[in-house]
């Protein structure tokens, strides 16, 4: 399929692929066999936007308009969020849970039991370094760092005057 949206590798070394707006669900490659999962198998929806692996090895899948699904290796569990659109745009494990970007509703944190709005920010990318979560928006919001307590907007410069941003991040772990 030419519409691959994301690829990740789980703790067992399996490769997981999701197909951007293609309606094919997700596929897992174990090194010899491809296995596909769709709504028929319990996935929230076949239109998948992102996939992530948490600290326990569970697979998280964000869908367009149908929320997120969690796979524990045996069963898919549908998790409806407080977001009215239920668009799981991007996700990343953080701390004791997972952060999910629900678009216009911002970032939400799921701790395994409860949902809470984490920030009104939306994101084009997220990454974790140590205990720091970084959220980037190619629009007006810029790049933000969450240090476990506070959100800090990072300094961005355009040294080549061509719109290529460089972020000044000084981390000590």
Image (cartoon, rainbow, N blue to C red):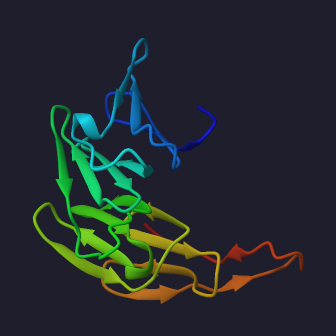
> Residue 118 sits in which quadrant?
bottom left
> Residue 156 sits in which quadrant?
bottom right
Q: Is residue 122 above or below residue 150?
A: above
Q: Residue at x 29, y 56 (%)?
A: 68
Instruction: Let me know if residue 170 appears in the view.
Output: no
Q: Residue at x 29, y 49 (%)?
A: 54
Q: Residue furthest top?
A: 32
Residue 13: percent from left, percent from top: 38, 27
Name the image quarter holding the C terminus.
bottom left
Instruction: Let me know if residue 138 appears in the view.
Output: yes
Q: In the visual, does 39 lie left or right of 24?
A: left
> Residue 128 sits in which quadrant?
bottom left
Residue 160: percent from left, percent from top: 89, 75
In this view of the protein, which residue sits in the foreground, 25 or 135? Answer: 25
Q: Residue furthest right?
A: 161
Q: Residue at x 40, y 37 (%)?
A: 26
Residue 93: percent from left, percent from top: 33, 58
């Amino acid at each position: 399929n030419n519409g691959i949206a994301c690829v990740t590798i789980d703790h067992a070394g399996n490769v997981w692929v999701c197909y951007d707006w293609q309606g094919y669900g997700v596929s897992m490659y174990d090194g010899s066999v491809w296995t596909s999962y769709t709504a028929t198998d319990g996935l929230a929806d076949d239109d998948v936007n992102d996939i992530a692996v948490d600290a326990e090895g569970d697979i998280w899948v964000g869908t367009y308009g149908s929320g997120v699904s969690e796979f524990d290796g045996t069963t898919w569990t549908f998790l409806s969020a407080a977001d009215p659109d239920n668009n799981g745009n991007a996700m990343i494990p953080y701390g004791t849970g997972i952060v999910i970007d629900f678009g216009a509703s911002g970032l939400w944190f799921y701790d395994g039991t409860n949902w809470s709005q984490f920030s009104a920010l939306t994101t084009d990318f997220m990454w974790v370094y140590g205990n720091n979560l970084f959220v980037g928006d190619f629009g007006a919001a810029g790049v933000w760092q969450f240090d476990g307590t506070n959100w800090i907007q990072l300094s961005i410069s355009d040294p080549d005057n061509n719109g290529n941003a460089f972020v000044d991040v000084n981390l000590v772990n």
